[in-house]
Image: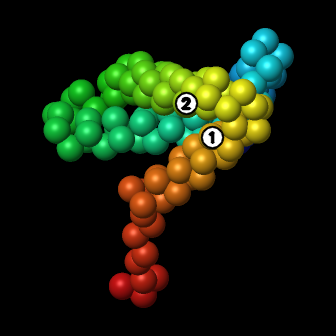
């Protein structure tokens, strides 16, 4: 029974993240008529910000305060994602005004997607370890 409840909770947690991402995508396109394919990348930025906050708490704060990183990670993740979204939105609006074409928005967004996918791969590398050590 305990395993079922844990699985149910994990499923509800994951489905709520996917629901919020898809609602954001639908609202962005529905209200602003902006094609935004970078929603997954923005979710990734929030997740990496949470991870960085956890690592900073573990490295610099005493062990009694390590459980409080959730309280700091949530606003930091929102702030980082907001700032990145503002920059991307400004670049998209600038590209549209400069060229007066919707394809410019798509090109800017494609460049942002490539950057947001490749940059964390360089920052957060996989540390390979041998299974026999």
Q: Please report contact status of discs 1 and 2: CB closer than 8 Å, yes or no.
A: yes
Residues packed near mark 1 inside 10 Å, few (<14), some (14 to 19) or many (20 plus): some
Q: Which residue is drawn at 46% across and 42% down?
A: 48
> Does residue 77 show up?
no
User: Which residue carries the number 2 mark?
Assistant: 91
Query: In this orientation, which residue lies closer to the viewer: 88 or 61?
Result: 88
Image vertical order of residue 56 relative to residue 131, above or below: above
Going from the N terminus, do you reach mark 1 or mark 2 first? 2
Q: Horizontally, is 122 left or right of 110 in the view?
A: left
Query: In this orientation, which residue lies closer to the viewer: 133 or 95?
Result: 95
Q: Horizontally, is 115 left or right of 53 in the view?
A: right
- Which numbered marker is on residue 108? 1
Q: Horizontally, is 91 left or right of 100 in the view?
A: left
Quarter of the C terminus within the rendering:
bottom left
Q: Is mark 1 on a helix, strand or loop?
A: helix
Q: Quadrant of residue 91?
A: top right
Residue 54 is situated, as x and y percent measured from the top left of the image, at 35, 38
> Does residue 57 show up?
yes
Residue 112 is situated, as x and y percent measured from the top left of the image, at 58, 43
| Residue at mark 1 to residue at mark 2: CA–CA distance | 7 Å
- Which numbered marker is on residue 61? none
Image vertical order of residue 46 relative to residue 125, above or below: above
Outermost residue, bottom side = 132
Residue 60 is situated, as x and y percent measured from the top left of the image, at 17, 38
Q: Which residue is drawn at 53% across and 50% down?
A: 115
Residue 63 is situated, as x and y percent measured from the top left of the image, at 21, 36
Q: Residue at x 34, y 28 (%)?
A: 69
Q: Residue at x 36, y 41 (%)?
A: 52
Query: In this orientation, which residue lies closer to the viewer: 130 or 121?
Result: 121
Residues packed near mark 2 inside 10 Å, few (<14), some (14 to 19) or many (20 plus): some
Query: In this orientation, which residue lies closer to the viewer: 67 or 122?
Result: 122
């Amino acid at each position: 029974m305990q395993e079922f409840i844990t699985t149910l909770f994990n499923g509800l947690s994951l489905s709520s993240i996917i629901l919020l991402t898809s609602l954001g995508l639908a609202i962005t396109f529905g209200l602003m008529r902006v094609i935004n394919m970078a929603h997954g990348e923005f979710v990734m930025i929030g997740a990496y910000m949470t991870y960085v906050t956890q690592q900073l708490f573990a490295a610099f704060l005493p062990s009694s305060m390590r459980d409080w990183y959730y309280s700091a990670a949530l606003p930091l993740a929102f702030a980082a994602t907001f700032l990145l979204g503002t920059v991307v939105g400004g670049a998209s609006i600038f590209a549209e005004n400069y060229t007066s074409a919707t394809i410019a928005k798509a090109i800017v967004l494609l460049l942002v997607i490539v950057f947001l996918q490749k940059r964390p791969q360089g920052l957060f590398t996989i540390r390979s370890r041998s299974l026999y050590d």
